[in-house]
Image (cartoon, rainbow, N blue to C red):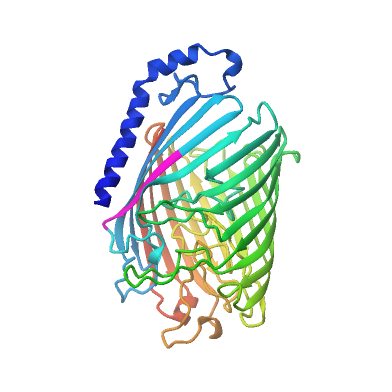
């Protein structure tokens, strides 16, 4: 019944989109009757975008993405057990957005999303045992922006938004994930030609199957982000974040078998993050490029809620990369190196924590394609090669070597909360056995082809070579991952 109703709503939405397209002549005539002063500069014109109407005042955007995945031993590194993640499945995501700009100083944006997981042995509950799950037709974004930085330096944006800062290591829309990430937020931006400063307060939106997705009232996040190009040939960013979070772990549901892994934002905490990021400007260093980021955190962490034992947090993380592109050579090869480090806790029982907290990351393309690691308790050395055989085709190969920063802390997966394993097969805490800190190696291959301006096809394969840490703490089978994804967007 619910599926049937959702299908009807989705068809109704597509019908409405078709109706708007059908009204193109009317909307175009309305646009011709306006004065030039009312038209925002640099808007998308109807002749270049078939979904842009009314001289760029009304724009539709559509995305249909489908990805097939196959995984083996990704969750437990144990080939002797058939885990529900040792499987293949199909992920589908449909998004429909509408931008309305009736005057230069007002922009209204709304976007719906329908996301599904099919042909999987996993539960369809988002976040349970790694599942993407189903989130039928829901509101993804709905915001109002007052101002235009090209006309006046202040812009205020209020509502549900997809927000990313810097390279997305700490705050980002999860673009790889089928559900993505948005925030209910208020942002005030001051922008000049060579710098911008943004103050914000926000709450992450929680995915709730078959219900309207609410923001988490117990997870409050705010801060300042400053970015400038005053230093020649690079972008320099400074940021301050503050997170105040209550324990919002759900009660276990014996019917759906909901466990807390991946389905909540972690135990209570209150801490600040201060950071610096630099990134070279494209094509300014004769083929060379570089980036670096450093973040330090201080505050308090709790075991569960504010009444549970508290630890004082003091931790840092850093990332540095560099590469060289042979721009005059066939296929324009780029060779790069990257090192990512995040501190782990050396003693879980001393009342102090040095385990770096990852906030709301998007780490899919940073710490291995298989998403086995996050920016927490980690050493990751990556070598990569990028090739461009044609303008439409891009090829990539990455080789990662992973170590845990401290084996007195856990191995954290890509969201920085979920852990690989907490106990050995004989019941001992993995943090107490003195395991080797070499986690393993991963090799990734990715091919991306722009079939047309609006259609992209991407395929990838990864193999993980299990390291000594896995052998010391339990099963240590190698793991495999492959995917094929098509994206249609307008």
Horizontal side of 161 relative to 395 (left or right) equals right
Residue 341 place in picture, x, y as percent: 62, 64
Residue at (44, 13) in percent of width and height? 29
Residue at (46, 28) in percent of width and height? 59
Locate the C terminus by quadrant: top left
Q: Main secondary structure of the magenta part?
A: strand
Which residues are the magenta region?
A: 111-119
Q: For residue 431, which quarter of the picture?
A: bottom right
Residue 486 versus residue 38: which sits nearer the camera?
38
Residue 293 place in picture, x, y as percent: 66, 54
Residue 285 versus residue 86: which sits nearer the camera?
86
Q: Can you say whether 110 is above or below 296 in the image?
A: above
Q: Can you say whether 454 is above or below 472 in the image?
A: above
Residue 232 place in picture, x, y as percent: 74, 38
Does any portion of residue 309 appear in the rendered image? yes
Residue at (53, 86) in percent of width and height? 433
Q: Looking at the image, how many numbered discs can be counted on the residues?
A: 0
In reply to whether residue 347 is colored magenta, the answer given is no
């Amino acid at each position: 019944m619910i599926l049937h109703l959702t299908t009807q709503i989705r068809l109704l939405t597509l019908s409405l989109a078709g109706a708007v397209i059908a009204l193109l002549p009317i909307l175009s005539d309305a646009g011709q009757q306006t004065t030039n002063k009312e038209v925002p500069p640099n808007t998308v014109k109807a002749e270049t975008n078939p979904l842009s109407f009314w001289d760029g005042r009304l724009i539709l955007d559509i995305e249909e993405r489908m990805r097939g995945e196959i995984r083996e031993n990704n969750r437990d590194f144990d080939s002797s057990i058939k885990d529900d993640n040792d499987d293949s499945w199909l992920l589908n995501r449909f998004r429909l957005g509408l931008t309305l700009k009736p005057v230069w100083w007002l922009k209204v944006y709304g976007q719906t999303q329908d996301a599904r997981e099919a042909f999987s042995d996993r539960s369809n509950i988002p976040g349970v045992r790694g599942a993407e799950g189903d989130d039928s037709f829901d509101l993804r974004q709905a915001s109002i922006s007052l101002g235009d930085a090209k006309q006046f330096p202040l812009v205020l944006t209020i509502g549900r938004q997809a927000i990313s800062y810097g390279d997305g290591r700490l705050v980002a829309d999860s673009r790889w994930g089928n559900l993505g990430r948005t925030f209910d937020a208020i942002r005030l931006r001051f922008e000049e030609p060579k710098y911008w400063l943004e103050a914000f307060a926000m709450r992450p939106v929680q995915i709730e199957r078959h219900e309207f997705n609410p923001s988490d009232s117990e997870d409050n996040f705010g801060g300042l982000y400053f970015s400038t190009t005053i230093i020649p040939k690079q972008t320099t960013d400074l940021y301050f974040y503050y997170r105040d979070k209550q324990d919002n772990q759900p009660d276990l549901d014996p019917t759906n078998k909901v466990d807390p892994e991946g389905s909540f934002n972690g135990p209570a905490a209150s801490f600040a993050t201060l950071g610096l990021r630099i990134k070279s400007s494209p094509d300014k260093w004769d083929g060379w490029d570089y980036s670096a980021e450093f973040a330090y955190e201080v505050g308090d962490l709790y075991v569960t809620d504010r009444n549970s034992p508290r630890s004082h947090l003091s931790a840092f993380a850093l990332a540095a990369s560099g590469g060289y592109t042979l721009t005059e050579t066939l296929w324009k090869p780029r060779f790069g190196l990257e090192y990512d480090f995040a501190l782990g806790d050396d003693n879980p029982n001393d009342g102090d924590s040095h385990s770096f907290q990852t906030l709301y990351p998007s780490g899919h393309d940073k710490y291995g394609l298989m998403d086995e690691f996050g920016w927490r308790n980690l050493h990751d050395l990556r070598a990569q090669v990028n090739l461009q055989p044609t303008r439409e085709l891009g090829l990539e190969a990455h080789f990662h070597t992973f170590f845990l920063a401290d084996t007195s802390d856990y191995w954290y997966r890509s969201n920085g909360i979920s852990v690989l394993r907490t106990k050995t097969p004989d019941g001992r805490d993995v943090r107490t056995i003195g395991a080797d800190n070499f986690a393993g190696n991963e090799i990734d291959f990715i091919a991306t082809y722009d079939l047309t301006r609006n259609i992209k096809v991407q395929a990838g394969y990864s193999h993980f070579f299990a390291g000594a840490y896995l052998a010391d703490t339990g099963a240590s089978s190698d793991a495999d991952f492959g995917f094929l994804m098509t994206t249609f967007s307008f």
